[in-house]
Image (cartoon, coloured by chain):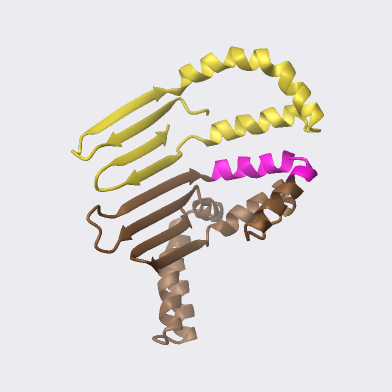
Chain colours: A yellow, B brown
């Protein structure tokens, strides 16, 4: 399943944590019409690069799906950052 | 499990135990996991790593800022998809990427990474643990790469 939400947590030197929930589903919905509009150009670009466009789209879809559960944390005494894709 | 095995091998390398004792210990450590699962396939699936973890701890000697810790968890699915993406790239692009990596001292041939060998690669990653400890110019860096 493609990721729906990304959570970004920021901690400042005063140990105050700001948590930002990014609804990725809205971004996908906004990008979908753009992808449809650009699809002929993507198709031509794939053919020029001698890449099977259908396999290319399938792999990009797999990468999108695989992003779920990715977690990146950076901790320092003065600040911290956490990025989690759900 | 890997941690136990590593400790046993460490004891063996230090001469604290003999090779026979190490073998017995390793089989004893592995036995409960095999017995705990109802089927062999369940054991295999439990052994399949789900995430690749990279942990970096960096600390400056005498620094007042405290240590910096980086913790990255990447799903194995992303690795699988990445290898499939590499399989899509034209050979010319792969050769250029190989050349660029060799210039940086990374002797990896991307043309040899094929989706057919992917599962075998991931299976072997289960036993992979890379620990790097570096003390350099007042900075202590510890990098740990492993699968879970």
Horizontal placement of B11 versus B39: left or right? Answer: left
In the picture as drawn, the residue positioned furthest to the left comes out as A14
Relative vertical location of residue B75 with respect to residue B147 in this rendering, above or below: above
Give the residue at x 62% y 57%: B104
Observer able to see residue B31: no
Give the residue at x 43% y 59%: B144
Image coordinates of residue B94 in percent, x first then y, are 74, 46
B106 or B104, nearer to the observer: B104
Horizontal placement of A38 versus A51: left or right? Answer: left
A17 or A66, nearer to the observer: A17
Give the residue at x 35% y 64%: B140
Magenta-span inclusion, residue B24: no
Image coordinates of residue B28 in percent, x first then y, are 43, 72
Image coordinates of residue B65 in percent, x first then y, are 25, 52
Horizontal placement of A77 versus A54: left or right? Answer: left
What is the count of numbered marks? 0
Q: Quadrant of residue A31?
A: top right
Observer able to see residue A34: yes
Give the residue at x 44% y 61%: B33
Q: What stretch is highlighted in magenta?
A: B76-93
In the picture as drawn, the residue positioned furthest to the front comes out as B137
Q: Quadrant of the N terminus of chain B?
A: bottom left
- Our reading of the magenta stretch's main secondary structure is helix
Relative vertical location of residue A40 with respect to residue B106 in this rendering, above or below: above
Image coordinates of residue B12 in percent, x first then y, are 44, 82
Relative vertical location of residue B140 with respect to residue A78 in this rendering, above or below: below
């Amino acid at each position: 399943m493609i990721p729906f939400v990304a959570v970004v947590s920021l901690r400042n030197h005063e140990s105050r944590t700001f948590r930002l929930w990014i609804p990725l589903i809205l971004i996908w919905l906004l990008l979908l019409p753009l992808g449809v509009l650009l699809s002929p150009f993507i198709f031509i670009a794939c053919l020029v690069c001698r890449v099977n466009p259908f396999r290319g789209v399938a792999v990009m879809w797999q990468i999108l799906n695989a992003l779920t559960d990715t977690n990146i944390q950076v901790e320092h005494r003065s600040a911290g950052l956490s990025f989690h894709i759900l | 499990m890997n941690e136990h095995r590593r400790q046993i091998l460490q004891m063996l390398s230090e001469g604290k135990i003999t090779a026979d004792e190490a073998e017995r210990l390793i089989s004893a450590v592995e036995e409960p996991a095999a017995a705990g699962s109802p089927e062999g396939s369940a054991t295999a699936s439990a052994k399949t790593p789900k995430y690749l973890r990279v942990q970096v701890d960096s600390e400056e000697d005498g620094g007042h800022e405290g240590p910096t810790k980086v913790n990255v968890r990447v799903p194995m699915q992303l690795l699988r998809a990445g290898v499939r993406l590499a399989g899509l790239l034209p050979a010319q692009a792969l050769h250029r990427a190989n050349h660029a990596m060799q210039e940086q001292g990374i002797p990896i041939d991307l043309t040899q990474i094929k989706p057919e060998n992917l599962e075998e690669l991931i299976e072997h990653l289960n036993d992979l643990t890379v620990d790097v400890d570096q003390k350099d110019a007042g900075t202590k860096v510890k990098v740990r790469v492993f699968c879970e």
